[in-house]
Image: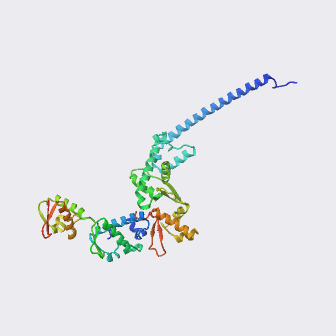
Amino acid sequence: MADFEWPWQYKFPPFFTIQPNLETRKKQLEAWCSLILSYHRHTKSYSLNITEAQSSPLFYNKSLSRKLHVDGIYTILDELNKKGHIEWKDKSKKECLIMWRTPGEWGKTIYKWADDKGMKNTVCTMYEITNGEDSEDTEFHGLENWLLLRSLKCLQAEGKCEIMAGNEGVKFF
Amino acid sequence: MHRRGAGLGAIKNKNLAQAKYKDKGTEIAEDKFTQMTQQMDTFKTNLEDFARKHKDDIKKDPEFRLQFQEMCASIGVDPLASSKGFWAEMLGVGDFYYELAIQIVEVCIATSPKNGGLINIEELRERVEHARGRNSQNISIDDLYRAIRKLKILGSGFTVISMGSSALVQSVPGELSMDHTKILQQAQKNGFISQVDLTQNFKWEVERACRALEFMVKQGLAWVDDQDSNGRKYWFPSLCTNIGR
């Protein structure tokens, strides 16, 4: 994580205490939301385990000896949930899926890429999209399957692609 | 015996003399006035010449600008009094300070989400200079003060809170009381303060310290930190200029 650029708030001790003043808290939550998303974008990870998260540098700034406590983590994740950027894997809320881009946003990016590469009206495999040579320099290279499928479903709903039976391939229109 | 000045003729003479004195007086006054006007004209021409000659220095060098301002102030001339005046045309200084004022407002608005509308004057200076671009002239703290004074016309939105060697510029409405200013001064060194600092250093009652601190939290000027081993700390982003820059 050497090259990740932490926001100034991360070096500001009170950032790790949920603020009592509503206005300030609003700013704080916003900063946390964008920090969580950009952190996951940087590490290209798509899920977050609450137990593990507590000792991750994301929520624990060792040099300040400040950490965001579980309650705080939940407060922020609930906020992200409202915005459609996370989803709980189960009801016990132990783990969540993180979408630093929503499926709709991913869908658009992928569609544009397919268009640029002249891949419309041909069938390409899911593997090709996220692991193929053609997508190596794209942000969705390495995108997890569940998220890819969801993004494509968004596109399908708009009539821009059709997912083949078995979820192995897709055809863009 | 010779009696003088008691007859009708004498009164007449006296009146005449008085009228003559008056005339002479007016004459002298007029003379003086013309003389003064002439002097002022000469002075103005010289000042203009000076300004014209050192126009570039005045515009570019904040130190020189300050000295020029001080010189003008000591003889009761305010080059900034009107943007339409001779000085503005001559030097563009009127515009300079209005432009600066707008840039100050912009920086204050842009940074208010972070600092709650309170900014260190040095940070403000750096940000304004940055906003003006690399090729623009240097801005001194004195320039900022002058520009902020111009903003007073628009109401009490902008205030400078003096903090000893430094100062804070407050761009949010709302008066800070003496207590709040004192808290800021005390917190200046570390960027934070605790209730105990206030009760010990200022001998304030707990209730007074509490009320003042709560007010600053409510105004969005202070953030609370509950993870310090010595109890709750109140942090002021506006005083933490070294963080995140």
Q: Quadrant of residue B36?
A: top right
Where is residue A103 drawn, in percent x and y? Answer: 23, 65
Colouring of the image: rainbow
Question: Up-down: is A153 above or below B135?
Answer: below
Residue most extreme to the left: A122
Q: Quadrant of the N terminus of chain A?
A: bottom left
Q: Quadrant of the C terminus of chain A?
A: bottom left
Q: Nearer the viewer, residue A23 or A3?
A: A23
Q: Nearer the viewer, residue A107 or B144?
A: A107
Residue shown at the point (48%, 51%) measured from the top left: B148
Where is residue A120 drawn, in percent x and y? Answer: 13, 59
Asked if residue A143 shows in the view, the reply is no
Q: Quadrant of residue A41?
A: bottom left
Residue shown at the point (52%, 68%) measured from the top left: B210
Where is residue A163 drawn, in percent x and y? Answer: 15, 65
Residue shown at the point (45%, 55%) measured from the top left: B125
Question: Up-down: is B168 above or below B86?
Answer: below
Where is residue A85 drawn, in percent x and y? Answer: 29, 66
- In the shown orientation, is residue B183 left or right of residue A173? right
- In the shown orientation, is residue B64 left or right of residue A135? right
Residue shown at the point (50%, 64%) measured from the top left: B215
- In the shown orientation, is residue B75 left or right of residue A123? right
